[in-house]
C-alpha cells in the first residue's frame, strides 16, 4: 500500500498491518522495518529478517490485549544494525532500536512496547527496559509540541 | 527550563532557544543536542561541542530568514557519534544526524534544514543533501498520521 503521508510504498500484511484491540491506545506504535536484513556477512536474505520479525510480532500480538499498534515500514536508515524498529506516539519521544533478533526477542519487544505505551512522554527508564534491549537504542527524537 | 512535554530539563539560551521569523513554518524543527561531546579521546569538554553548535546555528540563523525552528534538547542517545541533531516536523519523517562538526558544518546544516522544511514528508533526496551530511544519517522515524 502507499503511505498516505509519505506516498512511499509501505510493505505490509494486508489484513493485519495494524493490530487494534479494544484497549489500544492510539498514542503508541511499534514500527518494524520489514526491509531489514540482520547484520551478517551473508547479505540480504529472503524473507528479510525484518519481515520475519514483523510476522512474529503480529502473530504474538494476535493472542494478547496489546496497548500499541504494529506497523510495517520500509528502511529506518539503520541498516548496519538491523533488525530495526521505531517506537513513537503523540507527545512521546520516539526511539529507534537496532540489533533485534527476530527469533528470540519477541517477548522482550512486546514488553518494551507495552511499557512505552504506558508512559506519557515515551521515556521508559533504562532499568525497566528488558535487558536484551538496553544497549540497543540507536537514537531518539523529541516529540513535537 | 523544563520541557512542557517531557518534564525534563532542556538546556537552552533563554532568549533564543527557538528562532522564529515571519516566514517560519511551524512544521520543521532542528533539535540540537547541547549535551553532546564530539567523539574524541579527550572525554567531555566544556562548553560541550553541542552547545557550541547550537550557539553558532542561532547566531547564523539570526541574520537569515530561516524556515525552521532551532531548539536545544538534551541527549539524542547517539553519544558515540556526536555532535547530534534531529530534524522533525508535523507529518514528516524525523531524521537523526550525527558526527556534526560544530566549526565547519553550519552552512551545510542550515541548507539541509531549509530543504527539509520545504518538503511535505521530510524526505530530502540523498543527492540533494549537502555532501558532508549524506553519510551521517543515524536513523529515521516515521511520522504519526
Image (tube, coloured by chain):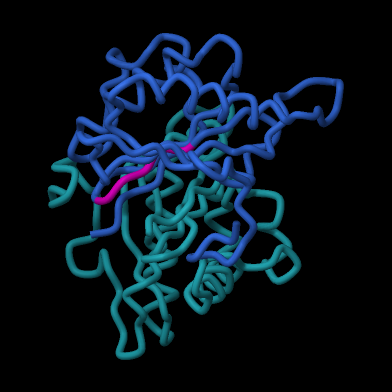
Chain colours: A cyan, B blue
- Residue at 13 percent of width and 48 percent of height: A2
Q: Nearer the viewer, residue A65 or A141?
A: A141
The secondary structure making up most of the magenta span is strand
Q: Which quadrant holds residue A36?
A: top left
Q: Nearer the viewer, residue B76 or B117?
A: B117
- Is residue B35 shown above or below A11? above
Q: Outermost residue toward the front?
A: B15
* Magenta residue check for A12: no
- Residue at 49 percent of width and 74 percent of height: A120
Residue B56, percent across and down?
Answer: 54, 21
Segment tinted magenta in the rendering: B86-90
Is A53 positioned to the left or the right of A24 in the image? right
- Is residue B41 shown above or below B46? above
Which quadrant is the N terminus of chain B positioned in? bottom right
- Residue at 58 percent of width and 74 percent of height: A111
Residue B83, percent across and down?
Answer: 62, 28
Residue A91, percent across and down?
Answer: 41, 65
Which quadrant is the C terminus of chain B positioned in? bottom left
Q: Does the rendering let one see residue B12? A: yes
Amino acid at each position: 500500500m502507499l503511505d498516505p503521508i509519505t506516498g512511499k510504498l509501505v510493505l505490509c500484511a494486508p489484513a493485519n498491518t495494524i493490530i487494534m484491540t479494544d484497549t489500544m491506545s492510539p498514542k503508541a506504535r511499534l514500527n518494524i522495518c520489514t526491509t531489514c536484513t540482520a547484520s551478517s556477512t551473508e547479505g540480504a536474505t529472503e524473507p528479510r529478517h525484518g519481515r520475519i520479525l514483523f510476522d512474529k510480532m503480529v502473530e504474538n500480538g494476535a493472542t494478547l490485549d496489546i496497548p500499541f499498534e504494529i506497523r510495517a515500514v520500509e528502511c529506518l536508515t539503520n541498516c548496519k544494525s538491523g533488525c530495526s524498529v521505531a517506537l513513537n506516539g503523540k507527545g512521546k519521544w520516539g526511539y529507534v532500536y537496532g540489533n533485534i533478533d527476530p527469533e528470540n526477542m519477541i517477548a522482550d519487544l512486546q514488553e518494551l512496547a507495552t511499557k512505552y505505551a504506558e508512559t506519557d512522554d515515551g521515556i521508559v527508564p533504562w532499568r525497566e527496559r528488558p535487558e536484551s534491549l538496553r544497549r540497543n537504542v540507536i537514537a531518539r527524537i523529541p516529540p513535537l509540541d
